[in-house]
Image (tube, rainbow, N blue to C red):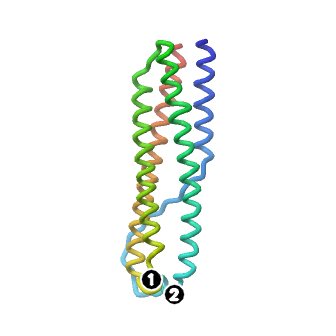
Amino acid sequence: MIIDMKKGIILAFVASVIILAFSPVLTFAVEHRDLSDGDIGAISQNCASIKIHLQRVQKDDAKNRVNLGSQYETIATNLMLNLNLRLVKNGIANAALTEQQATFTSERTRFKDDFIGYSQEFENLLNINCKEEPIKFYRQLELVREKRADIKASMNRLNDILVVHRQTILKLKESL
């Protein structure tokens, strides 16, 4: 029974690492600067193509959010929660794993909230007429970039938790 549990732990963790390793990666770029007259003119002149590109980015981001959210949910429930329940059931409770599960769940909620905020600001960006209000458009774009950076930071924190979680699982496996 303990050997089956070891195999289950390892398989669940390997599956989660593979899912994260091959998940679509959102690209993030944050650049702050003042706009020159040429920049303002370029935004105004290329407004239609900018909007088309941003709509594609928005669509891709929505797909990536669904995929990442699903993967994070799978890891939280199928790996972390099930592992902790099984350990408790077998009298091998591990405080570090329980804490990591709670931290991951909390950070996953933060990721969802950050993405909602990002999506709302992105929608606000798309509602600005960049041809008539290029400066307002660019300022909103900067805000969207900041929100996107928040998502990236959250993803990094989630991945860091998973790295520590893996190390804890390996130590537990050695002790069994």
Camera-nearest label, 1 or 2: 2
Q: Which residue is mark 1?
A: 39
Q: Which percent across, then down, holds residue 171?
A: 50, 21
Q: Quadrant of residue 63?
A: bottom right
Q: In the figure, 48 relative to 53: above or below?
A: below
Amino acid carrying label 2: it is: Gln
Question: On the picture, is 66 further left or further right than 117?
Answer: right
Q: Is residue 6 above or below residue 75?
A: above
Residue type at mark 1: give it: Asp
Q: Which mark is residue 45?
A: 2
State left or right for residue 146 relative to residue 174. left
Q: Residues within 10 Å of mark 2 (few under 14, many from 20)?
A: some
Q: Is residue 110 left or right of residue 3?
A: left
Q: How far apart, in angstroms, are the residues tagged by discs 1 and 2?
A: 10 Å
Expressed as whole percent of the image width and height from the top left, the position of residue 10 reads 60, 26
Q: Are marks 1 and 2 in contact (CB under 8 Å)?
A: no
Q: How many marks?
A: 2
